[in-house]
Image: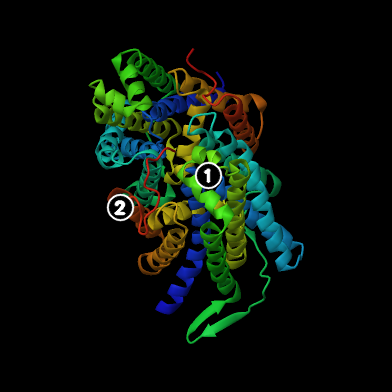
Amino acid sequence: MSGYLEGVLALLCINTVLAYGAFLPMSAGQLNLGIAAFVAIGAYSSGYASNALGLNPILAALGGFAVAASVGWLVAFPILRTRGIYLALATFALNQVVQGTILNVDAVGGAAGYPVSAHVGFPVVAAFAIAVFALVAALFHTRFGISVTAVKDDERAADVMGLSVRGMQSAAFTVGAGLAGLAGALYAHYFNYIEVQNYGVLFSIYVMLYVLLGGTQTVYGPLLGAALFNLLPELLRGSAAWRYVIFACLIIAIMSLRPQGVLVKR
Amino acid sequence: MLEQQVVNGLMLGSVYALVAVAFTLAIGILNFLNFSIPGLFMVSGMLTWLLLRQAAPWPLAALGAVAAAGALSLLVERFTYRLMRTSEHFVPLVTSMAFLILLENLMLIGWGSDQQRVPVPFGSASAHLGPVIVSVPQLLGLGCAVLAVACMDFLLKKTRLGRGVRTIAEDAQLATLLGVPVERVVPLIFLFGGLFTGLAGFLFAVNYQQASPFMGEEVALKGISAMVVGGMGNIWGAILGGLLIGLVETFAIFGLGARAVDLCVYGALLAILFVRPTGLLGGVSRHQRM
């Protein structure tokens, strides 16, 4: 396998993990514009753990998941008090605050970026992506999948049926944050360099867009969205700017013709 | 030089205020977070640069830039609000973001990612108010912002069109029943939003003499913050919020350094969302969709 192909596939795997990080809160009806903040938290905390504390990169990646999930769980309390457009705006502000904070921490390089020395190979990244996909797919075949859909469709009805609405929302937000953190940790250890400037709101928006492109009704949607977003432009051999032009046109067309995303429930 | 900082802050704030008004019109009336606004802002700024570079007179550049933003906004309406009733609530938001990505990257392909230097159309004209120096574009900007919003306010409160708009804001279905021509009024709201954004883009370009394909992002994020601070859906709130954010940003740079700006502005935004989500002047309080 050539280095180029491996790089593309590794990015696809990382973006698949990320897509599920965005999919979970969305499946509970939350528009989380702060995904990039959790990616940054996962990337920097795991990078710091393997650089400064000498932790094994695979353990550090799991640590990135844990740190991002913990932060997600903590901020879920105030954030989930808001809803709809206010939730989107609160997560957006959170993204800016986290980015601004990391930018000011000199221990992880601040604005200069942060090189991560430990490396994980492609097989590890792929294994993580497959595991995440399998776990999320399994999760959505349990009661959790039905419950979370119920909460999204009608909070009051779900409450009446005895579901813990706040618990489901908080769980979806927290696990989503953790997966985003895991994606960040994998990126940090595969590409060995992270820059917090990349993890702005626009990054969050891209992730959200390709999940919506694939469709949020089934667990296979995010996988398809990530694949479309990553592979199609490679096949078209366009420049980065053309990639986004095509992507944007695709989004506009699909949202006009098939507003539920490419994959829908029958 | 405290007075000078106040003037600079108000100037920056008037750009934010205009963008915030565009956002607040879309949210307050249509309940729609229109993410194409940074794209329109950027198109207007880049067009200002292109026209002034060709030695076009500045009123022509202003007119071209503002008109282009207005026209693009109408195009965005076709693919967003028009589809809103037949699809899920997040679709217009997503499509408007796609327009932002589309506009930015088309501009990138056309003119590259460099920050372009916009020639100053007014020479070095400036007014001295005691020790404070106010440049002509600064005065023009503040004047335009306040005037435009005053006109909008009059339009909304006193005219037949404004009454229709306010009915749509209450309930679009009810407005249709009452005979408000929703199909014609909604594009007008988009047009006004586009014109405000275009004006902001022009003022930003001539004031800070810079334009780039990504110039809209930072300003729009501040504009959204300004809208929330003032109270979503309230146009005078947008003005107040815009000026406040402009002042906070100027003073944060002046007192704490450039790196602290985002923390101050967005930290304040987060706090307001948790404590008083309706903003300073109050805004839409009914159940929010997206």
Q: Crowdedness of circle 2 by 10 Å Cα count: few (<14), some, many (20+)?
A: some
Residue A145 appearing in the image? yes
**In the rendered view, does A107 fall on the left or right side of B225?**
left
Residue with the mark numbered 1? B35
Query: Is A246 in front, or is A30?
Result: A30
> Picture coordinates of residue B96 (x, y %)?
56, 40
Residue B105 or A235: which is nearer the viewer?
A: B105
Q: Circle 2 sits on which residue?
A: B276
Considering only vertical position in the picture, is A67 above or below A218? below
Element under disc 2: loop
Q: Above or below — where is B37 with respect to B131?
A: above
As helix, strand or loop, the secondary structure at mark 1 comes to loop
To which quarter of the image does residue B208 belong? bottom right
Q: Please say whether residue A116 is visible from this viewpoint.
A: no
Kind of residue at disc 1 = Phe
Write the residue at 45% across / 33% down.
Answer: A191
Residue B99 sits in which quadrant?
top right
**Which colour style is shown?**
rainbow
The disc label shown at residue A129, or none? none
